[in-house]
Image: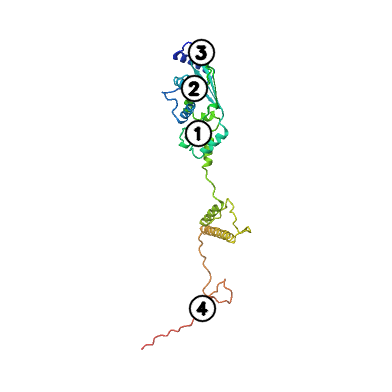
């Protein structure tokens, strides 16, 4: 074709042209973000490798992806910006080409299913972004049809190069560049699919949350605490009434048991209050010296009623008298 007749441009000439373009963009106030690959491996972390493996699993991309790997390794992707739902990039070839990749938002039903299946299985956001996931969770998020990664029909691509193929080498380089960028910023995958990664952690917390005790068990626990500490606790849940027979009336044994427990609790509460009050009074009372009485042994006490003999006097009156005889001297 006609673009094959173009003169060959060396790698040094492409790099010089790319540097001039970057300086021009910097003067315009644009912050460029090139893809720089160290060594032969494009992606090293879970999310980056999963993205690249997902692309290579489709035969639609198998013919052009090898050329894209070469381009991304030699630094031809001089700028790559990931925004919600799309990616823009500049790729250096025989010329500088503008590339745009659009991804369809993740279907709501698929996202709901992913959250439901991952609930309670992800420890934290750090574990999620670092790829510290169990094998089950990895298989869920990387599922070919029901995972987080896009299918070929959900990707729309456009390149300004004269190659009219569905996937040119510049587009393939950008797709691999996305995987390399996910190595450094895995949260950008969720930005691309227009979902919030925090919802996975929220779903995990709701699934692992504690459940309330039944009302009957909670009432028994409160009653036990009342017996131990001698206080009356207010129950947060109303104890369900027990129904006996077809009449729907509460059973006599259940009502008697509740009345007995309530009476015992009230008596313990009253005893506790009384004991505490007496202790406080005794602690606060200062010792008082006894006043000397002016009464004589012969005078009756003022507290006694006149003419009424005391109990000790009665005892003396009724006690028989014993006469002591002196022993006779011989």
Q: Is residue 294 above or below residue 156?
A: below
Query: Picture coordinates of residue 32 (x, y %)?
Result: 51, 21
Q: Is residue 221 above or below residue 19?
A: below
Q: Are marks 4 and 1 in contact (CB under 8 Å)?
A: no
Q: CA distance from mark 4 to mark 1?
A: 103 Å
Q: If you read the primary sequence from the N terminus, does the residue marked by circle 4 or circle 1 appear first?
A: 1
Q: Which residue is mark 4?
A: 315
Tell me whether circle 2 and circle 3 mark residues in contact (CB < 8 Å). no
* Marking on residue 108: none
**Which comes sooner in the sequence, label 2 or label 3?**
3
C-alpha distance separating marks 4 and 2: 124 Å
Residue 236 percent across, percent down from the top left: 58, 50
Q: Element type at marker 1? A: helix
- Crowding near the residue tagged with mark 1, few <14, some 14–19, many ≥20 C-alpha atoms within 10 Å: some
Which of label 1 and label 3 is nearer to you? 3
Q: CA distance from mark 2 to mark 3?
A: 19 Å
Labelled disc at residue 3: 3
Crowd tier of the residue under label 4, counting other residues whose Cα lies within 10 Å: few below 14, some 14–19, many 20 or above? few
Nearest to viewer (mark 2 / mark 3): 3
Tag 2 residue = 172
Give the alpha-carbon distance from disc 3 to disc 4, as whole Å.
142 Å
Query: Residue sitting at 53 percent across and 78 percent down?
Result: 314
Q: Nearer the viewer, mark 4 or mark 2?
A: 2
Q: Residues within 10 Å of mark 3 (few under 14, many from 20)?
A: few
């Amino acid at each position: 074709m006609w673009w094959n007749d173009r003169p060959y441009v060396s790698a040094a000439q492409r790099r010089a042209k790319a540097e001039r373009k970057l300086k021009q963009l910097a003067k315009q106030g644009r912050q460029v973000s090139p893809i720089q690959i160290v060594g032969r491996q494009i992606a090293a972390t879970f999310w980056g490798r999963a993205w690249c493996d997902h692309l290579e699993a489709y035969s639609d991309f198998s013919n052009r992806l090898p050329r894209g790997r070469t381009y991304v390794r030699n630094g031809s992707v001089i700028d790559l910006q990931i925004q919600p739902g799309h990616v823009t990039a500049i790729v250096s070839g025989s010329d500088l080409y503008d590339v745009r990749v659009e991804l369809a938002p993740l279907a709501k039903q698929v996202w709901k299913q992913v959250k439901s299946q991952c609930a309670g299985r992800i420890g934290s956001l750090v574990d999620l972004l670092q790829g510290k996931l169990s094998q089950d969770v990895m298989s869920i998020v990387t599922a070919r049809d029901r995972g987080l990664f896009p299918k070929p029909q959900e990707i729309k691509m456009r390149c300004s190069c004269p190659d009219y193929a569905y996937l040119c080498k510049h587009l393939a380089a950008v797709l691999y560049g996305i995987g390399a960028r996910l190595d450094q910023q895995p949260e950008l995958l969720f930005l691309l699919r227009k979902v919030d990664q925090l919802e996975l952690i929220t779903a995990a917390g709701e699934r692992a949350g504690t459940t309330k005790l039944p009302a009957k068990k909670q009432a028994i626990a409160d009653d036990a605490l009342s017996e131990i500490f001698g206080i009356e606790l207010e129950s947060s849940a109303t104890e369900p009434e027990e129904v006996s027979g077809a009449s729907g009336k509460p059973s006599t044994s259940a009502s008697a048991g509740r009345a007995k427990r309530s009476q015992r609790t009230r008596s313990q509460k009253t005893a506790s209050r009384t004991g505490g009050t007496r202790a406080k009074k005794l602690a606060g009372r200062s010792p008082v010296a006894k006043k000397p009485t002016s009464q004589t042994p012969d005078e009756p006490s003022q507290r006694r009623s006149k003419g009424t003999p005391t109990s000790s006097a009665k005892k003396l009156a009724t006690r028989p008298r014993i006469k002591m005889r002196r022993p006779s001297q011989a």
